[in-house]
Image (cartoon, rainbow, N blue to C red):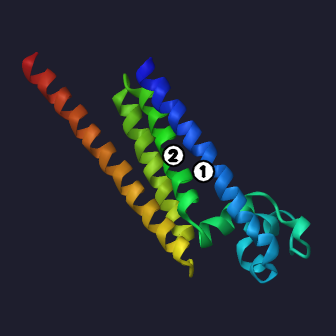
Amino acid sequence: MIRFVIPFSVSIAVLLFSAAVAWYEGSAILDNPWEWRYSTPFTQLLYGVVNNPSDISQPDYFVYASKFQPTFPIIMILSSLYLLILIGYNTLKQKRKWLVFYLTFLGGGLFLISYFTSYSPTVGGHILFSIFIICGLLRISTALIINFQVLNLIKVNKVTN
């Protein structure tokens, strides 16, 4: 149990700290009205055109920080992925097939998210695209390795019986 609680607690702390710093860094969007058209997708989706700084929603702070100061958003994404894998592994370690499906689903989601960041003109967008692709490939390859281990265990059990 302690092998789960300590990494879980540390990754939650890292996630909260990096989210707070990314949120603070992203609040600079309030001072850059020329960027409102390009860096406020959530506000535009929910409310339409942004006319005042008070119209900007909180998730758009993270979009702005990801585009122009990506260090803490990257740490936030990596700690979130670590948490998802840690929770999924501890929940599904007895059911290896379900773990394979979970990791494949997670990798596919990362590939989908990388599609949305693939055409970003900013350096932060390119870095996020690379991170999403690499993490997606790692999740899919881990799922394949676990799947082949499960298949080998099934073959070995059939041969010995």
Q: Write down the residue under mark 1.
A: 18
The image quarter containing residue 61 is bottom right
Q: Which percent across, then down, holds residue 90?
A: 44, 26
What is the CA distance from the residue labelled 2 to the residue labelled 1?
9 Å
The image quarter containing residue 157 is top left
Side (left or right) of 80 relative to 156: right
**In the rendered image of this protein, does residue 142 appear above or below residue 161?**
below
Q: Which percent across, then down, holds residue 17?
A: 62, 46
Q: Write down the residue under mark 2.
A: 79
161 or 56, nearer to the observer: 56
Q: Which percent across, then down, holds residue 120?
A: 56, 77
Q: Which percent across, then down, holds residue 44?
A: 81, 70
86 or 46, nearer to the observer: 86
Question: Decide: marks 2, 1 in contact (CB < 8 A)?
Answer: yes
Amino acid marked by disc 1 = Ser
Side (left or right) of 126 relative to 31: left
The C terminus, quarter of image:
top left
